[in-house]
Amino acid sequence: MEKTLHIQDMDYKLKSSLFTIISYKSTFGTELFSDISVLDQLSQHNNLSALSTVIDVIFRITYILHKPFTKSSYDEFLQGFDFAVLSNTVELETIANTIAELLGTVKEGSNTKK
């Protein structure tokens, strides 16, 4: 499945496939779905270190989904975002919802889990 994510006046094409799982592990050394379950656990906490981990995992997943369309490294990808993205809850929610749609954890255009 493919989607286009519009963040900070930029369009990022994203694509999910079975290779997404392999690419995530080879790039970051952790399992994609393990990190997603960490997100679920951390969503119940309300501290700064949890927020940092959530943001890290969200941008890792976004990078892996965008990777078929870029030659940029993860560091270069992150450098393309202004720091202000972290305080823009609408854009962070858009990123999270798009990830959920692409990885099949919610129905497209819905706010409820499958």
Image (cartoon, grey):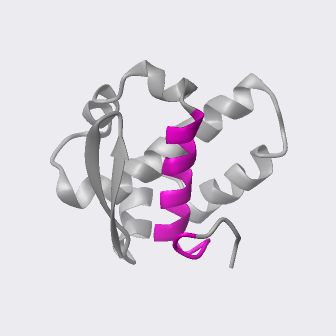
Q: Is residue 15 above or below residue 104?
A: above
- Residue 79 rendering spot, x and y as whole percentages: 30, 26
Q: Which residues are magenta?
A: 89-109
Would residue 28 appear left or right of 54 to someone viewing this image?
A: left
Q: Is residue 17 above or below residue 67?
A: below
- Residue 73 falls inside the magenta stretch: no
Which of 19 and 95 lies nearest the eye of the viewer? 95
Which of 63 and 6 lies nearest the eye of the viewer? 6
Outermost residue to the top: 83
Q: Main secondary structure of the magenta part?
A: helix
Give the quadrant of the C terminus.
Answer: bottom right
- Residue 98 falls inside the magenta stretch: yes
> In terms of image quadrants, where is residue 105?
bottom right
Q: Identify which residue is drawn at 24% across, 39% down.
A: 73
Q: Identify which residue is drawn at 45% across, 46% down.
A: 60
- Residue 19 rendering spot, x and y as whole percentages: 35, 73
Residue 6 can be seen, yes or no: yes
Count of residue discs: 0
Give the quadrant of the N terminus.
Answer: bottom left
Which of 77 and 14 lies nearest the eye of the viewer? 14
Q: Is residue 4 above or below residue 46?
A: below
Would residue 78 appear left or right of 94 to someone viewing this image?
A: left
Residue 31 can be seen, yes or no: no
Which of 13 and 33 lies nearest the eye of the viewer? 13
Q: Identify which residue is drawn at 36% across, 62% down.
A: 23
